[in-house]
Image (cartoon, grey):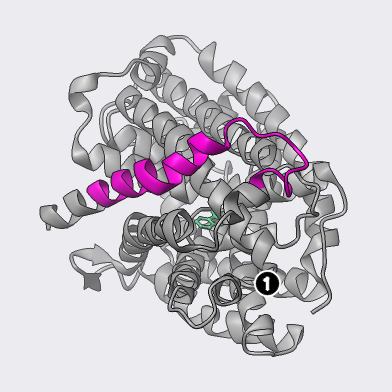
Amino acid sequence: MAKVQFGSKIGLIAATVGSAVGLGNIWRFPAEAQANGGGAFLIVYLACVLLIGIPVMLGEFAIGREGATDAVGDYQRLSPGKKWWLIGGIGILASYLINMFYIVVAGWTLEYLFGSVTGDLFAGISETQSSGVHFANKMQEYIQYDFGPLIFSYVVIILNIVILLKGVKKGIERMSNLMMPVLFILLLIFCYVSVTLPGASKGIEFFLTPDFSKITPSVIINALGQAFFSLSLGMGVLITYAAYYPKKTKLIGTATTVSLLDMLVSVLMGLIIFPSIASFDLMDNSYKGLTLVFVTLPEIFQQMPATQFWSVLFFLLLFVAALTSTISIGEVTVRFCQDRMKLSRVKSVLLVFIPLFIFSSLCSLSQGSLSDVKIFGLTIFDFLDTFATNILLPIGSLLMCIYLGWFAPKGLLVKQLTNNNSVAVRLSKVIIFIIRWIAPIAIAMILLSQFVKF
Ligand code: TRP
């Protein structure tokens, strides 16, 4: 296998941030924060990222750069003849399941982009109807009426096929370099607009003031699940990307930068959503989950001059953020088919994505015609999200920590953290301690509490 590498340090960070920053930050984070008590969720989430997320990310980097192939192959190479490769297998399964619904949401963002460009999203707002009702109706149209969302999710699949066929690095690396900074600037602008709205302070308070009595086991599991999802952990994405890291890349610096930037996007998103729903007096109940991004944000745009311009820009960037993430998810399975099953790039990409036309359709329809089909009381879409995010990702990471902390070849982690002893790393003892003890125990306890609940 020819060894491909990212071209530059910035490009590598941008591509990894491109994987991390996505719908998880912009769509999922505010919804989770709202459902789990605002400030209480934020503080648990931050703790999860710093204490568990960054070390687990480093673990994935170390395995990936050392193994230098796909998520399953890395384990086989590092510990031949053992069953550890099954961890990589869980990751590959999780990545496939996540892709099924992630593609659908990416399709919605594209549909919103389209609606913003044509003006359809804002067309026909009447005097008699509040703008909230208008955008709620639009959301129904865009998400639940079978045909539109199906078509747009197919477009996303086709874009994935095209980009992955071309080879990711040049396209993705370049696109990420350009788009990520613009995304940050835009978020800052929206954030400014939102926090200066009249009556915004109630929302800021909800998001930033932790009410410790609201920290329950389910808040913790949701925060941890969100941290894994947002940092792209637990399913071999970062293992796969780290195989493309040059030898001299400093892993700790990279993991910290990526995680902090990812966290920043989520926090900014919270500061955009909550002040504005407070200002519009929508804090109570009806505006939650999906509607935050797809109803509330358009309402803010409507308050701003040059409505359509901002809306186009926002949904374009949201779409790009989603696309860089789907690409990273797809790359896991594609790389697996290429390296393990020895298929060509073209065959691998097709084998991975053609079935997704069907699976993603089911997810998409579960918002509309198939909304009565329930698995454990959840729609297909919600079931995949909950099962993959709250169960498979933590299990994958737990096993990876156990492997790396206790069973991997001696010195692997230190060697990777210090670039073969060429850089001094004072923190490596702490990181090893977290990977051996803290992270597995925390993840295990949280998983257990999840099972006890059932
Ligand atoms: N992290 C991305 C987001 O926040 C989604 C994502 C990309 C992901 N790759 C992943 C989630 C791997 C879990 C595992 O939107």
**In the drawing, does residue 442 fall left or right of residue 55?**
left
Residue 304 in percent (x, y) is at 62, 23
Instruction: Give the residue at x 54% y 52%.
Output: 59
| Rendered image quadrant of residue 2 | bottom right
Q: Is mark 1 within 8 Å of ligand 1?
A: no
Query: Magenta segment: does it hold 416?
Result: no
| Rendered image quadrant of residue 274 | top left
Query: Magenta segment: does it hold 438?
Result: yes
Residue 104 in percent (x, y) is at 51, 64
Query: Secondary structure of the magenta portion, mostly?
Result: helix
**In the drawing, does residue 131 fall left or right of residue 373?**
right
Indicate whether 257 appears above or below 421.
above
Instruction: Give the residue at x 58% y 70%.
Output: 78
**In the drawing, does residue 382 fall left or right of residue 312?**
left
Residue 102 in percent (x, y) is at 51, 61
Q: Nearer the viewer, residue 364 or 101?
A: 101
Instruction: Give the residue at x 82% y 44%.
Output: 9
Image quadrant occupied by the C terminus: bottom left
Q: Nearer the viewer, residue 281 or 220?
A: 220
Q: Nearer the viewer, residue 431 or 152?
A: 431
The kind of secondary structure element at disc 1 is: loop
Q: Which residue is mark 1?
A: 69
Residue 22 visible in image: no
Circle 1 residues within 10 Å: few <14, some 14–19, many ≥20: many
Residue segment shown in magenta: 417-446
Q: What amino acid is labelled 1 in the image?
A: Thr
Indicate whether 91 appears above or below 205.
below
Image quadrant occupied by the N terminus: bottom right
Instruction: Give the residue at x 22% y 70%.
Output: 374
